[in-house]
Amino acid sequence: MSSANIVEQAKRTAAFAAVDKHVDSSVRVLGIGSGSTVVYAAERLLELKNEGKLHPDLLCVPTSFQSKQLIVDAGLRAVDLDDLPVLDAASASFASIDVTIDGADEVDSELNAIKGGGGAHLREKLVANASRKLVLIADSRKDSETLGTKWEKGIPVEVSPLAWRTIKRQLERLVPQSRAQSAALASSAAFSFANPKAELRQAVRKAGPVVTDNGNFILDVAVGSIYDPLSVEQLIKMIPGVIEVGIFSGMAKEAWFGNEDGSIVCRVPKSEAK
Ligand SMILES: O=C(CO)[C@H](O)[C@H](O)COP(=O)(O)O
């Protein structure tokens, strides 16, 4: 098998295992992520549907145009997040989705994740936030100790086209923390680069920038190693015109990684592991 096929097989194995663990006939509302690994989750959902193992009224919440097509192609019912019926108005939780299964670009030991390689992280974060459980699926290349060490393309940041150049300049002036301007202090800082670089993501087979499903642009912001994902997420989110940051801090409850030898690793946040 070619190395590309081995990676695809690893993604498929992880996706199938996560769906089998989390989706049965008791699941009423399911969030569907975006990207190439989620395609395999949709494949497994179609099999389970044909075997009569899904809830007959299952509702699927898409996270992108692509995700909606996957749901529809699998013969499942797509419903926008805000169109979900409130099934339990008395519940203390606002979460309306039982479980969401999504891909990731890199996942650290606490299951903080970089997402948005496919440019869908705004809707992905909205859906993850409204889910009782977020389960990530990926091949083992995405399994990391520290964010930014494997996914080196930068943090995907969805921004308003109205001020992308200004936001880019501001992102390139981010400092790890106000007192840590020197490389010597970098290890105690939120991230390692002294001079982050923000690049406007360019479209393929279309001249000009990527325009997201929401009509915005994406800046990929390389900050080096991310030691404190929540601080970096918050720092970037504070910039006016930033619509969403592709760091998902503390959202995922479980991550499934497919290995090249066909085995699977399922991880929970390190601090919660027994
Ligand atoms: O966050 C995402 C899209 O915004 C994807 O889930 C992420 O990029 C992983 O994609 P793939 O499964 O193709 O590696």
Image (cartoon, grey):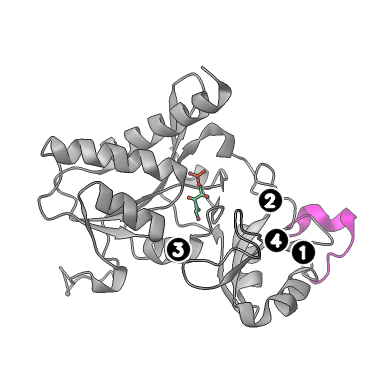
Task: Say which amino acid is labelled 2.
Answer: Lys
- Name the element at disc 3: helix
The residue located at (25%, 64%) in the rendering is 79
Q: CA distance from mark 4 to mark 2?
A: 8 Å
Label 1 vs 2, first from the N-terminus: 2
Taking the image as drawn, is residue 34 in sight? yes
The residue located at (52%, 54%) in the rendering is 118
Q: Dot 2, how many residues are within 10 Å of its Cα: few (below 14), some (14-19), or many (20+)? A: some
Label 3 vs 2, first from the N-terminus: 3
Task: Say which amino acid is labelled 1.
Answer: Pro
Question: Which residue is label 2 attached to?
Answer: 153
Depth check, front residue: 4 or 63: 4
Q: Is mark 1 within 8 Å of ligand 1?
A: no
Q: Which mark is residue 221?
A: 4
Q: Give the residues in magenta.
A: 178-192
In this view, 202 is above or below 271: below
Residues at badges 4 and 3 in contact (C-beta under 8 Å)?
Answer: no
Question: Which residue is label 1 attached to?
Answer: 176
Q: CA distance from mark 3 to mark 2?
A: 20 Å
Q: x, y percentage for residue 39?
A: 38, 42
Question: Which residue is label 3 attached to?
Answer: 125
Q: Is residue 189 a member of the stretch shown in magenta?
A: yes
Foreground disc of the pair 4, 1 = 4
Task: Say which amino acid is labelled 3.
Answer: Lys
Q: Dot 3, how many residues are within 10 Å of its Cα: few (below 14), some (14-19), or many (20+)? A: many
Q: Is mark 2 within 8 Å of ligand 1?
A: no
Q: CA distance from mark 4 to mark 3?
A: 18 Å
Q: CA distance from mark 1 to mark 2?
A: 18 Å
Label 1 vs 3, first from the N-terminus: 3
- Name the element at disc 4: strand
Q: Main secondary structure of the magenta part?
A: loop
Locate the C terminus by quadrant: top left
